[in-house]
Amino acid sequence: MNNKILLTLNNIYTKKECKDLIDITEKIGYKKASLYTDKQGNEHFYEDHRKSLRCIIDNEKLAKNLEKRIKNIFQKYIIIEIIIQ
């Protein structure tokens, strides 16, 4: 059985909320995305595999807000997967 899935979630945030999040990331800034970080904390970059920039925001309030908005969507998916299997 193929367990791969791709979901697109639309309208999770309002246009203003999206703009606010973009503004926050632009203030923090973007940096090259590493492929992995080793046990010593050194980031390893392989531009043949990953050429993007990213901004990581560690914010529990933002994470909880997103979780609250998408929780029902994923609970429905999990129930469907259990029934199918």
Image (tube, grey):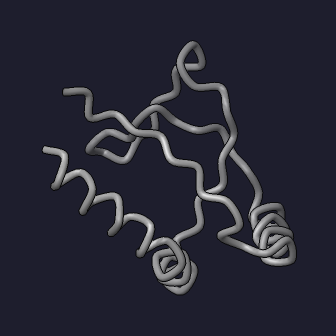
Residue occupying the point 59% across, 59% down: 56
Front residue of 81 and 70: 81
Most extreme residue toward the top is 48
Q: Position of residue 8 (x, y in %)?
A: 58, 49
Residue 9 at x, y percent in the picture: 60, 57
Q: Left or right of 27: which side holds 41?
A: left
- In the rendered structure, the answer to whether residue 25 lies left or right of residue 56 reads right
Residue under the point 79% across and 69% down: 18
Describe residue 56's horizontal placement relative to residue 10 as left or right: left
Residue 5 in the image: above or below residue 63? above
Residue 82 occupies which quadrant of the picture?
bottom left
Foreground of the two, 37 or 48: 48
Relative horizontal placement of residue 42, taking residue 14 as reference (left or right): left
Q: Nearer the viewer, residue 78 or 58?
A: 78
Residue in the image at 40% along x and 39% along y:
5
Name the residue located 42 percent from the left edge and 74 percent from the top edge.
71
